[in-house]
Image (cartoon, helix red, strand yellow):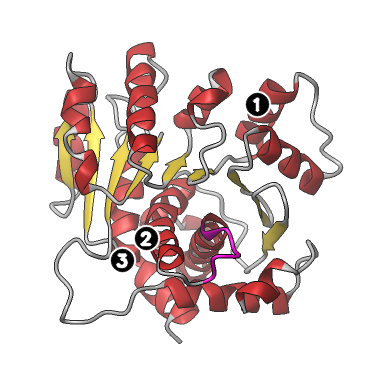
């Protein structure tokens, strides 16, 4: 199955979606009483500042609801109480703007299976500098790193921070993708051929996995493009990207763990992880829209993670 997947062309169709969904199912760890807390994923979110507290919450709670055992948020001091008030499920560390922020975060890195950098991070130089160093420290620990939102702003300014890191995953929307492309290529992007453009960006970034969110989510590692076309809805409320980035963090841990165990080594695990998270996000969007229509928010979508996960990956 894994070999069949990698020989597929770039044309998206329902059969292809089903084939890749079966690969995602194969990396989902079974629930068993023999496991201990933390074994199925301890995910860290780097983000959350005075202006942006919702995004890191959405990413962290989505990671938990997708199946991670523990979810940590490393945010600024003035964001911590607010984020804690959203949910007692999250472990919140008010250290991102402290003088010794890197040291405070670094001591937790050995306990984390994956990192999501950017939700609600903001663009203050001191926070971006801390995020950059934390990315470098995490690369040294060989854990999957998902970069979204303001983390992508950092990458556009300093591509080398993640360039060539095989467990790096970028999840830009169209505007973020355009900024990244033009920063790497120093010329306008050809929007008439997005598949070609996304492959070019991935190659320029050292064959990182790139997820271009849109009407169809395009996913590439520079050698193949797969498209996730599971039906969502026309509702585009803020926060959906945070649901995606949080769940990518969990799926990436599962996929790389499966790969290390010898399952499907011919396939880039990050591609499978990205497809799983895109599928889950789109299914949540569809189910929430069926219930709430135009008034659908990301909070409604997060309530659908359990049923959507079961429908896609456990049926």
The answer for how far apart the CA atoms under marks 1 and 3 are is 32 Å
Q: Is the residue marked by circle 2 packed among few (<14), some (14-19), or many (20+) residues within 10 Å?
A: many
In this view, the residue in front, 83 or 137, is 137
Mark number displayed over residue 9? none
Q: Residue drawn at (52%, 55%), measured in percent from left and top?
A: 270
Q: Is the residue marked by circle 1 packed among few (<14), some (14-19), or many (20+) residues within 10 Å?
A: some
The answer for how far apart the CA atoms under marks 1 and 2 are is 29 Å
Residue 18, compared with residue 257, is above or below; it is below
In this view, the residue in front, 226 or 123, is 226
Q: Residue drawn at (32%, 21%), measured in percent from left and top?
A: 130
* Callout 1–callout 3 Cβ contact below 8 Å: no
For mark 1, what is the residue?
179
User: Could you tell me which secondary element the residue under label 1 belongs to?
Assistant: helix
Q: Earlier in the sequence, mark 1 or mark 2?
A: 1
Q: Is the residue marked by circle 3 packed among few (<14), some (14-19), or many (20+) residues within 10 Å?
A: many
Q: Nearer the viewer, mark 1 or mark 2?
A: 1
Residue 204, compared with residue 69, is above or below; it is above
In this view, the residue in front, 61 or 195, is 195
Q: What is the x, y in percent for residue 67?
A: 31, 66
Membership of 268 in magenta stretch: yes
Q: Would residue 42 be visible to someone looking at this image?
A: yes
For mark 2, what is the residue?
302
- The residues colored magenta run 264-269
Q: Earlier in the sequence, mark 3 or mark 2?
A: 3
Q: Residue drawn at (69%, 67%), measured in percent from left and top?
A: 6
The answer for how far apart the CA atoms under marks 3 and 2 are is 13 Å
Membership of 32 in magenta stretch: no
Residue 293, compared with residue 55, is above or below; it is below
Q: Residue drawn at (36%, 48%), measured in percent from left and top?
A: 59
């Amino acid at each position: 199955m894994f070999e069949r997947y990698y020989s597929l062309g770039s044309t998206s169709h329902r059969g292809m979606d089903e084939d890749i969904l079966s690969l995602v199912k194969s990396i989902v760890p079974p629930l068993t009483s023999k496991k201990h807390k933390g074994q199925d994923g301890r995910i860290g979110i780097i983000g959350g500042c005075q202006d942006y507290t919702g995004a890191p919450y959405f990413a962290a709670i989505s990671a938990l609801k997708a199946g991670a055992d523990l979810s940590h948020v490393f945010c600024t001091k003035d964001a911590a109480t607010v984020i804690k008030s959203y949910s007692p499920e999250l472990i919140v560390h008010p250290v991102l703007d402290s003088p010794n922020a890197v040291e405070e975060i670094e001591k937790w890195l050995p306990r984390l299976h994956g990192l999501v950098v950017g939700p609600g991070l903001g663009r203050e130089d001191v926070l971006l500098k801390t995020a950059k160093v934390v990315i470098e420290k995490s690369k040294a620990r060989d854990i999957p790193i998902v970069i979204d939102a303001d983390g992508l702003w950092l990458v556009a300014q300093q591509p080398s921070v993640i360039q060539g890191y095989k467990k790096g995953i970028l999840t830009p929307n169209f505007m973020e993708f355009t900024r990244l492309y033009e920063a790497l290529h120093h010329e306008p992007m050809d929007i008439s051929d997005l598949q070609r453009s996304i492959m070019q960006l991935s190659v320029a970034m050292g064959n990182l996995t790139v997820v271009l969110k849109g009407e169809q989510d395009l996913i590439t590692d520079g050698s193949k493009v797969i498209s996730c076309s599971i039906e969502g809805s026309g509702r585009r409320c803020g926060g959906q990207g945070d649901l995606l980035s949080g769940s990518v963090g969990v799926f990436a841990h599962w996929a790389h763990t499966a790969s290390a165990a010898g399952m499907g080594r011919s396939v880039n695990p990050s591609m499978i992880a990205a497809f799983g998270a895109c599928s889950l996000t789109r299914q949540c969007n569809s189910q929430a829209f069926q219930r709430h229509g135009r008034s659908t928010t990301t909070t409604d979508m997060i309530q659908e993670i359990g049923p959507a996960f079961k429908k896609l990956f456990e049926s």
